[in-house]
């Protein structure tokens, strides 16, 4: 008898203790489980918010966490955080799925023979202590951790006189080394992208990886957004392959892999009137003329010269050196070359700062190599791995797995099984960062606190690594002045605290509330002079291991990073921002190259390097040089979790185990490969139908030159009568022409609910395509907020992906053979909430209809599933529940479900609802506060909240002063297919602004 | 002969109609009403003893225990501790052994597994505070709780059909959209309908 | 054939030269109802087997969810809707032949209309299942029916799908009644010869028909009245079905020509199906004397006419797409001819436009085997016509980034196959239980005994 639509598998209507579950069906009665003792701060049915720090990657963005009845249900960006400044990436959202990951360990695991047995914590700590005392020679291999944890580890390791290895799978070591060599800086440079007028990225994918993707994404959006004065910053990407970052460039210089240094120096040579400007690097500058650079890069000398001149004139400018994807044998030198370029262009201290000491993942691979050799030599007794998974993230060639098993006793702090933990003798499952205390120092002048937002997930008996170390130390007879990691951390901060700024408690509380405190370190004067290198540097193109005729580019995945995020179904199903492929791996190859070899898209090829081989399907991509192929990290897990295992291939299998000198970073661009078809084919699990707009007015653009008279450019015969049409049910006040309506609605318009007398708000959205970078954060945010199921690789291949947001990536112009303009259009396509919606009249049961507030509502429980609405939707934003997808969600992953949103069952249509639940929530709150009006910007849909680029604005368009009305008043505003179909969408887009001319009425 | 056909036919029609209504009304409730009476509560909690106004009853305000009804979508179920807060001093006159159970749960640090009586389908959102603040009495939806020793509500499979033909039951209308809509449609003092009947007000 | 011309043309009916005595008719037609032969049993068990496939597939789909089909986004409609329209189309010729041709006094209908009507009824029964098979939540499909309910909700009368509910149910009711009415005198005839259980059954359903003048009088009135009632439905039903598509904004669907186009197509496929069904009956039950080549010639001509109308519709669609100058429309139709589903389009064009050209030749029209083969081609072609309209239009719509491909699944194929078995199941039963040829109407066209033929039918 039940309708099958469950709002959530536990009861929202009251405080719930962990063990509750709704029993569906008529057989069993439903149980109401009250708190035993009710916590004051929790009102059942009302969300409680906490601030914390995202532990997802080294960027350490600020986070807000929404909890309901004591469970974290949604994470959001914290706008008060001085570094990330709001917004959150897809990976950040997906950390929730790691919290509720059903594959987490249920307790400390102790190896007995070839199987693992669950033990108690006391037992485990005793065992660890015993082993340390017995065998000694402790080696602590630690990934990125907060300063307090780092101190604790140092003290712990010192106490047992062991060694500590810092290791990051994805590391910016060359950049840090370059900053040290040239300016004696301690951390990474901090970039002020927003204020650059001309931005050069030498293969630096700063909105995907690096020190702060979210902040850099925001910066890029601000820079490239056209300002009131009608000017915008220009972004030039120099590299062999267009990453997500690259797709946002205005120009693309498809330079040869490894030629960044040559190009940077060549440009510097043009800029610097005399080579002396480069100080100790003068002779390097002399050696690299534009001609040499052009020779090395495979682009014309003129283009380099001309770019250099612009770089000098359009100051302030900014150049960023090669990132993780470009770690070749001279990566440090390449970064230095870029620093020289910034130096001679006078950007140091303006757009690039070396005094802020940005901390990020910079662990050196070289240390791991020594660790491996030490272990192989049997010099390691107890090998402890924390926050890293070297068995996966080190190339097979490194021999880590063999060496690690040489260690007498192997300990892992992994909270869920991974390739390294699988080898361990003792597993001490760490807490998820949302369950544990911690701190972070993203920049030398910022301290942010990571506080637990909920009780540990009861299914898993986990314990924070800090507490474990402290407890073990007690067994070892060491005392670090604290019994819990919380005390240890707090003591540390108390010591650091400078009483002049007020007492400790206050600032501690403040930090907990706001998420981070900024304390002025007193700006250390920026080093103005380049220092002479203290190591030998070569700026030449790096040597490659000869494995074939194609250079292999291995880059971190925008979805999985180095592979640590792979066990999240959200991320697995998130279409890659570049390829739009989900789940599996693919080899990017230029069309010309493929044609020469008779390879078609979907062909499975064998990629062979001197170090290994993988078999992977080909995806044809015009955004990669003809002499290169690219493969993303993060696939091919063998022992991580149900969603990661067997999905894709591990690109590292093709790489040598070698570290770049002097930085010691792992090489990602080190070898060439041969690509041979296996004869097999497969369907690519992509969501992309066609990357060509077919001349349709979907993602039009406007040339910078045309700004100010877009309307004229758009005017054609029949436009006036269209505007008359527009009056009916439309939003936008229509300029009076030949008796056409001047405002919505027309006299005698039959759209009753929309009549002016009607005082309800009119919800609408504006999306600025000039800001949107296609990073896809909104996609995951929406999935998390609206209980949107994931469907799996097979279903995606059948065309059944369910994401409510589809980032359409239309390629207008892309030429990998020469430097020139690049034009890629990113368009977040969601339900357009048409006032004149084609889906509404065809539904036989009013399951979809228009609310008086102008939202195109979908009433799930009324839907019969004829799918006519989907057929008739020109935007194809309606997705159908072909199976009971949510029934397959394993406990406790379903704890994440949003209790305010109905869980859809089999046979029901669904789509974007403008986050109706958030609208209702604010309405209810306003009503409680004696019926006050709703403020503009009080209702924030999930996509708007998480958008790092701040491209999305939601609000009441009936109010002229609302943000959305302001934005929509821009001349760039258009509505997709509206002029064609008169659908009157509520979602307004602002045209992308290009530097080059746009042909044919805005959509070329 | 003819007559028998007639009777048979009518019977069939009514059977179908009945089915339809079950689907239409009570049906969507899913779990909910069933087993209210037959399934005993873990503690025989007499609402009338607490909220009743008869002599010897305590005439407590509903929101004394259902604490969040006026500020949250959820009315809230009192925590075991808050039950004990009073009962630590009040052993109970009629059934002290039942009262004693509370302490048991508290000591075992266990929630009391109350059997749920009132439940709207999961796809309908009912914000308690909006209704409470609109001046509705709890009884308008829940029935004369303060007079019930054992909670129950008249929601049988035929309830919706009964309501169609004989009008809404004065007490709790079951998990029946008509019951909600009928009230939302009532005219307020200005003669306008007193609450929105827009689908998306409750279903999203 | 020559003696056909010599025969008196009674009310312009086609002569049956080899039939002279009225009780021959009863004998020949009613012998069909005698105990079935092996062939019948073989076909019947085959059909029953197909029914098992049919309901197993449907059951599986209900159990697992609609996902067992190949449907996806953007292609939300596929084989099911295709087959639905196909069967609705088949259903048309029956009423056309029995009702419209009756009103227009067309000479040649008497011999075939019974089979055609039966086909109509069973085809509608088949078609009616498909919307139910198609919806995501069958258990809520009754929400499309307007009735006062406890939710205070009504269906959306703007939606063509609701119109469908009315169209199909009305058509089924009327055509079934019409069919039943026409059979009553023949059932009575059968009753008089039948024995045992059969007799009892016929007694009940012949409603005490005695063949009195008064009964004949009422019968005639009722028959012509129902004929008049059914006639507009022939045109309206498939027009409504066509609006399922025409009302939408999908390029390739949104066309004003759809209603006439669909009706013509329906009659086309219907007549073809009649040929496909009547040929075996004629052979198996030795009814050559009653179903003469002249009848087939007439049906073939009807096929030819409708095939030309349909062909015109195709051409005009392509022409308008080009002439409109609307890029998206143009792309849609170009894609129809040369896109992913080119093969479907070309099957459709071949079977529906090119193959029937042969019907211009009298030799072909008079060759039963040839007609049988052609009719099967037409049936296939008409199914693919609907497939082309449904699938190719959907898979490349307005939003290029959301373009997709649809591959029918095994379950869908099982249900498609099953639907034919479901239809055959009923039709085979019909050939056993009711006279497949209208006895009383045949008798009307025979020279009455004991009278001079001159005064025949004065």
Image (spheres, coloured by chain):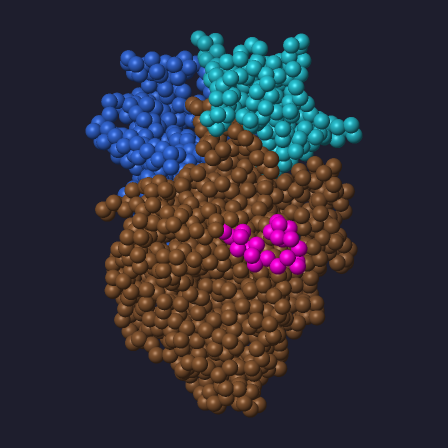
Instruction: Answer whether residue C304 is visible to the viewer in this image.
Output: no
Span highlighted in magenta in the image: A488-510
Figure check: A212 above or below A48: below
Residue at 38 percent of width and 14 percent of height: C204
How many marks can you see?
A: 0
Q: Position of residue A481 (x, y in %)?
A: 48, 51
Which secondary structure class fits the magenta region best?
Answer: helix
The chain that appears cyan in the image is B
Figure check: A346 above or below A112: below
| Residue sitting farthest toward the left | C38
The chain that appears brown in the image is A
Q: Is residue A552 left or right of residue A185?
A: left
Figure check: A155 above or below A792: below
Q: Nearer the viewer, residue A47 or B167?
A: A47
Q: Does residue C60 belong to the magenta stretch? A: no
Residue at 45 percent of width and 68 percent of height: A172
Q: Position of residue C95 (x, y in %)?
A: 45, 33
The chain that appears blue in the image is C
Q: Nearer the viewer, residue A154 or A959?
A: A154
Residue at 63 percent of width and 31 percent of height: B68
Q: Position of residue A164 (x, y in %)?
A: 38, 61
Instruction: Answer whether residue A610 is visible to the viewer in this image.
Output: yes
């Amino acid at each position: 008898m039940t309708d099958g639509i469950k709002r959530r598998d536990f009861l929202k209507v009251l405080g719930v203790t962990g063990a509750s579950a709704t029993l569906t069906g008529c057989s069993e009665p439903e149980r109401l489980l009250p708190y035993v003792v009710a916590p004051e701060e929790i009102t059942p049915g009302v969300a409680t918010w906490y601030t914390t720090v995202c532990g997802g990657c080294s960027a350490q963005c600020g986070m807000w966490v929404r909890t309901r009845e004591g469970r974290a249900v949604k994470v959001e960006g914290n706008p008060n955080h001085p570094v990330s400044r709001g917004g959150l990436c897809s990976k950040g959202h997906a950390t929730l799925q790691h919290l509720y990951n059903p594959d987490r360990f249920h307790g400390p695991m102790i190896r007995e023979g070839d199987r693992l047995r669950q033990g108690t914590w006391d037992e485990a700590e005793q065992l660890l202590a015993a082993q340390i005392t017995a065998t000694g020679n402790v080696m602590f291999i630690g990934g990125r951790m907060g300063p307090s944890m780092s101190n604790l580890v140092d003290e712990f390791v010192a106490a047992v006189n062991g060694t500590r290895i810092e290791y990051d799978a994805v590391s910016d070591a060359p950049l840090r080394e370059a900053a040290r060599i040239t300016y004696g800086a301690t951390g990474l440079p901090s970039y002020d992208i927003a204020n650059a007028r001309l931005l050069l990225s030498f293969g630096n994918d700063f909105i995907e990886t690096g020190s702060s993707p979210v902040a850099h994404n925001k910066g890029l959006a601000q820079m490239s957004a056209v300002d009131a004065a009608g000017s915008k910053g220009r972004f030039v990407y120099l590299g062999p392959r267009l990453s997500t970052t690259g797709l946002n460039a205005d120009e693309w210089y498809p330079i040869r892999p490894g030629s960044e240094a040559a190009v940077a120096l060549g440009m510097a040579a043009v800029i610097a009137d005399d080579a002396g400007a480069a100080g100790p690097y003068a002779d390097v500058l002399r050696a690299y003329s534009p001609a040499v650079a052009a020779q090395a890069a495979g682009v014309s000398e003129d283009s380099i010269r001309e770019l250099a001149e612009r770089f000098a004139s359009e100051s302030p400018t900014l150049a960023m050196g090669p990132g993780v994807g470009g770690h070749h044998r001279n990566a440090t030198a390449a970064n230095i070359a870029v620093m020289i370029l910034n130096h001679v262009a006078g950007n140091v201290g303006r757009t690039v700062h070396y005094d802020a000491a940005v901390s990020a993942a910079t662990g050196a691979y070289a240390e791991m190599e020594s660790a491996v050799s030490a272990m192989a030599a049997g010099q390691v007794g107890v090998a402890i791995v924390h926050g890293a998974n070297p068995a996966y993230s080190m190339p097979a060639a490194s021999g880590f797995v063999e060496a690690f098993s040489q260690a007498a006793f192997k300990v892992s702090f992994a909270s869920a099984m991974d390739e390294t933990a699988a080898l361990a003798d003792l597993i001490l499952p760490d807490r998820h960062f949302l369950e544990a205390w911690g701190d972070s120092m993203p920049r030398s002048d910022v301290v942010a606190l990571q506080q637990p937002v909920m009780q540990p997930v009861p299914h898993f008996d986990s314990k924070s690594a800090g507490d474990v170390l402290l407890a073990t130390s007690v067994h070892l007879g060491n005392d670090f002045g604290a019994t819990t990691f919380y005390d240890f951390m707090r003591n540390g901060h108390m010591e650091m605290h400078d009483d002049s700024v007020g007492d400790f408690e206050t600032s501690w509380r403040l930090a907990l509330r706001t998420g981070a405190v900024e304390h002025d370190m007193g700006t250390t004067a920026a080093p103005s002079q380049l220092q002479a290198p203290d190591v030998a540097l070569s700026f030449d193109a790096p040597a490659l291991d000869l494995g074939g005729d194609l250079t292999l580019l291995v880059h971190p995945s925008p979805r999985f990073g180095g592979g640590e995020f792979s066990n999240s179904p959200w991320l697995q199903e998130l279409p890659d921002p570049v390829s739009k492929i989900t789940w599996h791996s693919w080899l990017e190859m230029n069309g010309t190259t493929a044609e020469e070899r008779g390879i078609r898209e979907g062909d499975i090829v064998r990629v062979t390097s001197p170090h290994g081989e993988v078999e992977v399907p080909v995806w044809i991509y015009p955004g990669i040089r003809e002499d290169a192929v690219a493969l993303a990290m993060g696939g091919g897990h063998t022992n991580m979790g149900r969603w990661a295992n067997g999905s894709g291939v591990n690109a590292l299998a093709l790489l040598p185990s070698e570290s770049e000198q002097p930085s010691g970073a792992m090489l990602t661009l080190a070898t060439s490969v041969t690509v041979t078809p296996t004869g097999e084919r497969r369907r690519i699990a992509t969501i992309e139908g066609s990357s060509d707009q077919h001349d349709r007015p979907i993602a039009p653009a406007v040339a910078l030159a045309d700004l100010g008279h877009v309307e004229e450019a758009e005017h054609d015969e029949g436009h006036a009568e269209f505007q008359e049409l527009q009056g009916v049910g439309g939003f936008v006040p229509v300029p009076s022409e030949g008796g056409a309506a001047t405002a919505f609605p027309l006299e005698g318009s039959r759209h009753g609910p929309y009549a002016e007398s009607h005082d309800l708000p009119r919800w609408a959205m504006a999306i600025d395509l000039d800001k949107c970078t296609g990073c896809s954060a909104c996609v995951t945010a929406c999935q998390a907020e609206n209980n949107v199921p994931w469907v799996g690789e097979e279903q995606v291949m059948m065309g059944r992906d369910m994401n409510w947001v589809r980032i359409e990536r239309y390629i207008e112009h892309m030429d990998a053979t020469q430097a020139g303009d690049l034009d890629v259009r990113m368009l977040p396509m969601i339900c357009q909430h048409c006032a004149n919606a084609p889906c509404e009249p065809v539904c036989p049961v009013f399951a979809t209809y228009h609310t008086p507030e102008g939202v195109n509502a979908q009433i799930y429980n009324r839907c019969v599933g004829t799918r006519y609405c989907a057929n008739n939707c020109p935007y194809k934003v309606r997705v159908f529940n072909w199976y009971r997808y949510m029934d397959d969600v394993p406990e406790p992953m379903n704890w994440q479900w949003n209790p305010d949103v109905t869980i859809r069952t089999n046979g029901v249509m669904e789509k974007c609802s403008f986050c109706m639940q958030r609208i209702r929530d604010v309405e209810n709150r306003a009503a409680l506060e004696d019926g006050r009006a709703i403020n503009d910007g009080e209702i924030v849909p999930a996509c708007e909240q998480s958008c790092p680029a701040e491209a999305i604005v939601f609000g009441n368009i009936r109010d002229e002063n609302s943000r959305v009305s302001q934005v929509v008043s821009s001349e760039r505003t258009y509505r997709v297919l509206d002029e064609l179909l008169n659908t009157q969408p509520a979602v307004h887009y602002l045209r992308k602004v290009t530097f080059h001319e746009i042909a044919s009425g805005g959509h070329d | 002969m003819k007559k028998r056909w007639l009777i048979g036919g009518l019977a069939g029609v009514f059977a179908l109609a009945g089915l339809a209504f079950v689907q239409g009304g009570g049906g969507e409730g899913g779990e909910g009403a069933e087993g209210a009476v037959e399934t005993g509560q873990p503690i025989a909690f007499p609402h009338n003893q607490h909220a009743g106004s008869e002599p010897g009853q305590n005439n407590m305000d509903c929101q004394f225990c259902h604490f969040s009804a006026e500020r949250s979508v959820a009315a809230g179920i009192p925590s075991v501790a808050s039950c004990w807060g009073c009962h630590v001093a009040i052993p109970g006159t009629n059934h002290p052994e039942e009262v004693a159970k509370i302490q048991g749960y508290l000591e075992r640090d266990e929630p009391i597994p109350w059997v749920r009586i009132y439940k709207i389908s999961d796809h309908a959102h009912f914000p308690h505070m909006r209704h409470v603040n609109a001046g509705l009495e709890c009884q308008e939806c829940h029935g004369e709780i303060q007079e019930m020793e054992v909670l129950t509500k008249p929601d049988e499979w035929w309830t919706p059909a009964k309501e169609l033909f004989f009008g809404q039951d004065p007490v709790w209308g079951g998990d029946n959209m008509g019951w909600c809509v009928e009230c939302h449609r009532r005219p307020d003092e200005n003669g306008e309908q007193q609450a929105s009947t827009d689908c998306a007000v409750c279903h999203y | 054939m020559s003696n056909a011309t010599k025969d008196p043309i009674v009310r312009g009916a086609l002569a049956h030269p080899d039939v002279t005595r009225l009780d021959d008719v009863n004998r020949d037609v009613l012998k069909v109802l005698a105990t079935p032969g092996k062939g019948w049993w073989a076909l019947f068990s085959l059909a029953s087997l197909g029914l098992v496939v049919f309901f197993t597939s449907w059951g599986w789909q209900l159990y697992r969810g609609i996902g067992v089909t190949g449907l996806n986004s953007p292609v939300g409609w596929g084989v099911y809707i295709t087959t639905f329209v196909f069967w609705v189309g088949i259903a048309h010729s029956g009423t056309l032949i029995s009702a419209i041709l009756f009103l227009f006094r067309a000479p040649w209908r008497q011999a075939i209309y019974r089979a055609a009507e039966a086909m109509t009824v069973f085809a509608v029964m088949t078609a009616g299942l498909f919307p139910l098979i198609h919806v995501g939540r069958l258990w809520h499909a009754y929400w499309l029916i307007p009735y006062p309910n406890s939710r205070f909700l009504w269906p959306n009368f703007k939606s063509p799908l609701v119109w469908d509910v009315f169209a199909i149910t009305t058509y089924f009711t009327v055509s079934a009644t019409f069919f039943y009415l026409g059979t009553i005198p023949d059932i009575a005839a059968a009753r008089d010869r039948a024995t045992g259980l059969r007799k009892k059954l016929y007694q009940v359903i012949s409603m005490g028909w005695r063949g009195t003048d008064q009964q004949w009088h009422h019968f005639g009135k009722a028959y012509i009245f129902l004929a008049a009632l059914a006639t507009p439905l022939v045109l309206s039903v498939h027009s409504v079905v066509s609006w399922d598509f025409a009302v939408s904004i999908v390029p390739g669907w949104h066309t004003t020509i759809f209603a006439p186009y669909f009706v013509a197509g329906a009659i086309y496929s219907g007549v073809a199906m009649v040929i496909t069904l009547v040929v075996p009956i004629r052979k198996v039950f030795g009814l050559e004397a009653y179903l003469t080549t002249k009848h087939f010639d007439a049906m073939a001509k009807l096929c030819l006419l409708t095939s030309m109308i349909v062909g015109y519709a195709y051409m005009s669609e392509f022409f308008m797409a080009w002439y409109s100058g609307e890029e998206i429309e143009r792309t849609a139709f170009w894609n129809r001819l040369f896109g992913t589903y080119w093969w479907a389009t070309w099957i459709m064009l071949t079977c529906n436009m090119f193959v029937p050209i042969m019907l211009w030749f009298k030799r072909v029209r008079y060759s039963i085997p040839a007609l049988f083969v052609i009719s099967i081609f037409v049936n296939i072609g008409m199914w693919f016509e609907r497939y082309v309209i449904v699938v190719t239009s959907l898979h490349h719509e307005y939003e290029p980034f959301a373009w997709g491909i649809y591959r029918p699944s095994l379950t869908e194929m099982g249900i498609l196959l099953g639907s034919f078995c479901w239809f055959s199941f009923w039709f085979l039963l019909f050939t056993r239980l009711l006279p497949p040829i209208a006895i009383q109407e045949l008798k009307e066209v025979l020279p009455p005994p004991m009278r001079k033929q001159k005064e025949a039918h004065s």
